[in-house]
Amino acid sequence: MLKAILLAAVTATVVAAQDQAPNRRAVTIVARDFQFIPNRIEVVQDELVRIKQSTGTTLIHVTHDQEEACAIADRIAVMRDGLIVQVDTPEALYRAPRDAYVASFIDAGTIIRGRNIRHGALIEVSHPDIGFTGRLPPYLDGAQPIAALLPRNQAKVSLPAGLGNRQHALRGIVERLVFTGSVFNINVRVSERLEVRAALTMEEVATLGEENLRPGSVVELHWRPEDIVFLADSEVARAPSSP
């Protein structure tokens, strides 16, 4: 059974549309994907946005296609088991998912789980291979389990040059390199416990040399501490207790 869907609302709120046009039907439900219209998907998406902009009508499109949702939406709601777990603009949703489930569903990057250690206003997520420390965002109170997200587009890849004392870096072995049509997705195995996923542009791959990124190649991963996103770890919260 499908447990998650995206609701792509292409105006800010239903109430706003009703206030602007109280005598006009405010909400249209579009409950099917556009896959039945080969090669015309973008045309239909553009037409929905045009209708929204010209009439002020709130359109709610139910879909499992993330690109489709981002193409037509001003705001996206991610649902799980019938409940909305996050509502945000497409950019905010991908830049700062608030929950580990949302981050996993939209494939935002590598979710790191580990022991939570509080240092006053700071939180540390301590994994056997790596640790992240930073301030919790205001929507997290720190009482729930916390995970860390290393976003795919913020995990930078370089050829081995010696990590030295660099704190925010790891070395691993390339397991997979796949071109998606816009970016290269790379999976790097750091240890038996940890695999990190990153996204490389075509320019980055050309600079590094695709021959140096084939499976079995050794690479280094690095990131800026401010790029780490701290999340409520709903997967841990939902896990059954050990007998």
Image: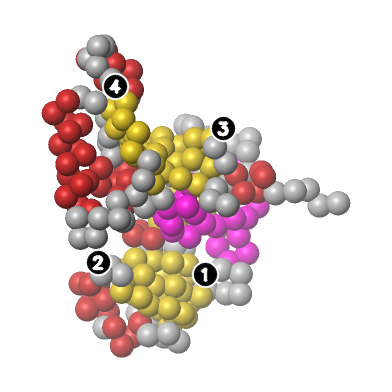
In three-dimensional space, the C-alpha distance between marks 4 and 3, rounded to whole angstroms, equals 36 Å
Query: Of tags 1 and 3, which is closer to the observer?
Result: 1
Query: Of tags 4 and 1, which is closer to the observer?
Result: 4
Q: Which residue is mark 3?
A: 141
Please give the label number shown on residue 195. Answer: 1
SS at circle 3: loop
Q: Which residue is mark 2?
A: 182
Query: Of tags 2 and 3, which is closer to the observer?
Result: 2
Check contact, mark 1 vs mark 3: CB within 8 A.
no
Of marks 2 and 1, which one's residue comes earlier in the chain?
Answer: 2
Q: Quadrant of residue 7?
A: top left
In three-dimensional space, the C-alpha distance between marks 2 and 3, rounded to whole angstroms, equals 37 Å
Identity of the residue drawn at 65% across and 48% down: 236
Is residue 53 depicted above or below 35 in this figure? above
In three-dimensional space, the C-alpha distance between marks 1 and 3, rounded to whole angstroms, equals 28 Å
Of marks 2 and 3, which one's residue comes earlier in the chain?
Answer: 3
Q: Residue 32 in the image: x percent, y percent?
A: 36, 45
Q: Quadrant of residue 60?
A: top left
SS at circle 2: loop
Mark 1: give few (<14), some (14-19) or many (20+) Cα within 10 Å. some
Q: Residue 101 in the image: x percent, y percent?
A: 53, 48
Of marks 4 and 2, which one's residue comes earlier in the chain?
Answer: 4
Of marks 4 and 3, which one's residue comes earlier in the chain?
Answer: 4
Q: Which residue is mark 4?
A: 26
Q: Quadrant of residue 131?
A: bottom right
Check contact, mark 4 vs mark 1: CB within 8 A.
no
Nearer to me, 202 or 69 = 69
Of marks 1 and 3, which one's residue comes earlier in the chain?
Answer: 3
- Residue kind at label 4, given as amino acid type: Ala
Residue range of the region highlighted in magenta in the rendering: 102-130
Is 173 placed left or right of 130 in the picture? left
